[in-house]
Image: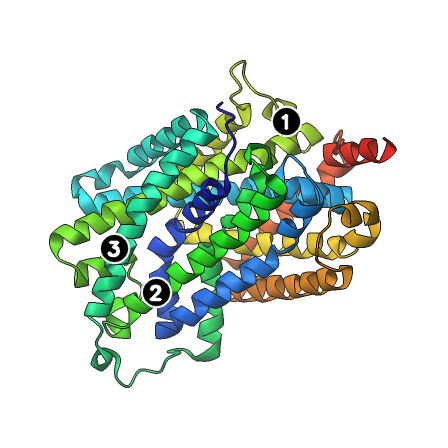
């Protein structure tokens, strides 16, 4: 693996690319179905809640330099069993996100080449294979691929916005309320859109690859979220202010683009917008997701081999993630089902870990003081209380809108049960806690 260091632009590019992908290109229409033109508000709310939900990570990145990203911070600042919950949920969430993105990529290819429709599974597996080949070539190479695809993606999305504004027609939605299904519809759309906002947190996992992790990781975290929020707002406005609610509800961005853009530009949007956005999500998500799993394997939550690398430095965990990503494709799981099942356990794990992180400034007073961080312990605690509230809101409305409640509850229980059993019967040795104790003794 290429270990050249990543600057803030590289990290932000990966963060933005990881956010803008399967979610917005496949789920925006469903969000519009919940709330109509209120989707712009829902997108801002969703991003704000997701940032709040994860707010402790950029703060902790200023205090500790740890390899393993969010998992490592949870392992150090929470009871040991919480690390097990995080590790189990990490595997499930990466499974779902990666599979959703690959399947969505194959579906957009079918819009360009309908003859591929019978071969969706084969196409999806080939796309997944190409993604891992890119990541194995090195983090810097992956970042360069990200940068190139991001530029084309921004151009395509820019064209979508321009044509949306050119087709702006208030008469098309005359008489329709801003929030087509009231406050409840708005909050259900917000919960659903929170899936499209996840991704920028993974830059916290790239501390080892960053030039200046204490500065670069938090900056990339917030820049990624801000850029994506602005892009989402203008995309949501363009998508909902040219046609009536009934005409576009449930449609993806590709279908809406076909309505308002000339044929050749609509094709460019499908390639440079949809496919490149999904591609950046795949490359960015894969490049930044394996470090936490390696850390959890070294700690004992996953098989030890997943914490090791080959002679040329390629992590074995990439092979594991590849197999994990192929399975849902082969099984033919529905994209929407996978999305709704991920948000509830994610939010519950975040709530548990945030509660145990409230007293970090007191338990790690020396590191907090020496880091020079400008956030007071009181403000840190207040932000984390807001993070808990954000998670409660997202979990509640995700569960309400979920059509597979029993399955979701079973999966959530399985994640917590795995963490509990592994903690009780496994051989757990939290490396981040060990490193902290060793440094404290020096």
Residue 254 is marked as 3
Q: Earlier in the sequence, mark 2 or mark 1?
A: 2
Please give left or right for residue 236 compared with residue 372 in the image: left
In the image, taking residue 234 as reference, residue 115 lies left or right, namely left
State if disc 1 and disc 2 touch (CB < 8 Å).
Answer: no
Q: Nearer the viewer, residue 377 or 83?
A: 377
| Residue 398 position within the rendered picture, expressed as x and y whole percent measured from the top left | 52, 62
First in sequence, mark 2 or 3: give its number: 2
Judge by depth and name the residue closer to the eye, 100 or 10.
10
Residue 274 visible, this angle: no
For image coordinates 44% across by 65% down, the residue present is: 43
State the separation of the CA atoms marked 2 and 1: 45 Å
**What is the residue that sits farthest to the top in this orientation?**
311
From the top left corner, tell me how far across and down residue 223 is, in percent.
49, 53
Q: Which residue reaches farthest left? A: 263
Report helix, strand or loop for mark 3. helix
Q: Quadrant of residue 326?
A: top left
Crowd class of label 2 (few under 14; some 14 to 19; many from 20; radius 10 Å): some
Disc 2 target residue: 234
Determine which of the numbered discs, if any, sits on residue 303 in the image.
Answer: 1
Q: Is residue 80 above or below residue 426?
A: below
């Amino acid at each position: 693996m290429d270990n050249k260091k990543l600057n803030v632009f590289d990290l932000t590019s990966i963060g933005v690319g990881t956010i803008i992908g399967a979610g917005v290109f496949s789920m925006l229409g469903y969000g519009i179905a919940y709330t109509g033109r209120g989707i712009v508000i829902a997108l801002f709310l969703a991003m704000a809640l997701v940032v709040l939900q994860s707010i402790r990570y950029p703060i902790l990145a200023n205090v500790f330099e740890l390899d393993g990203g969010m998992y490592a911070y949870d392992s150090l600042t929470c009871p040991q069993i919480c690390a097990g919950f995080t590790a189990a949920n990490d595997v499930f969430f990466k499974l779902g996100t990666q599979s959703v993105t690959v399947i969505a990529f194959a579906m957009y290819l079918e819009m360009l080449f309908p003859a591929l429709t019978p071969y969706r599974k084969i196409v999806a597996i080939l796309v997944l294979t190409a993604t891992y080949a890119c990541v194995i070539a090195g983090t810097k190479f992956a970042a360069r691929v990200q940068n190139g695809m991001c530029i084309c993606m921004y151009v395509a999305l820019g064209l979508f916005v321009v044509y949306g504004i050119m087709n702006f027609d208030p008469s098309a939605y005359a008489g329709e309320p801003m929030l087509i299904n009231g406050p409840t519809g708005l909050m259900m759309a917000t919960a659903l859109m929170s899936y499209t906002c996840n991704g920028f947190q993974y830059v916290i996992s790239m501390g080892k690859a960053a030039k200046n992790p204490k500065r670069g990781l938090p900056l990339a975290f917030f820049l990624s979220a801000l850029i994506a929020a602005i892009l989402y707002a203008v995309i949501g406005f363009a998508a909902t202010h040219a046609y009536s609610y009934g005409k576009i509800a449930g449609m993806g961005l590709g279908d809406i683009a076909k309505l308002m853009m000339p044929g050749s530009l609509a094709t460019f949007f499908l390639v440079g917008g949809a496919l490149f956005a999904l591609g950046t999500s795949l490359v960015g998500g894969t490049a930044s997701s394996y470090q936490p799993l390696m850390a959890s394997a070294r700690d004992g939550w996953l098989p030890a081999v997943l914490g090791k690398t080959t002679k040329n430095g390629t992590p074995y965990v990439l092979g594991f993630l590849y197999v994990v990503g192929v399975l849902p494709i082969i099984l033919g799981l529905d994209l929407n089902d996978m999305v709704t099942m991920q948000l509830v356990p994610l939010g519950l794990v975040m709530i548990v870990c945030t509660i145990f992180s409230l007293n970090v400034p007191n338990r790690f007073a020396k590191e907090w003081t020496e880091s020079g961080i400008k956030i007071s312990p009181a403000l840190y605690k207040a932000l984390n209380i807001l993070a808990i509230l954000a998670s409660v809101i997202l979990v509640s409305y995700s569960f309400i809108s979920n059509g597979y409640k029993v399955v979701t509850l079973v999966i959530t229980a399985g994640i917590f049960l795995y963490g509990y059993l592994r903690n009780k019967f496994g051989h757990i040795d939290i490396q981040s806690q060990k490193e902290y104790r060793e440094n404290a003794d020096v």
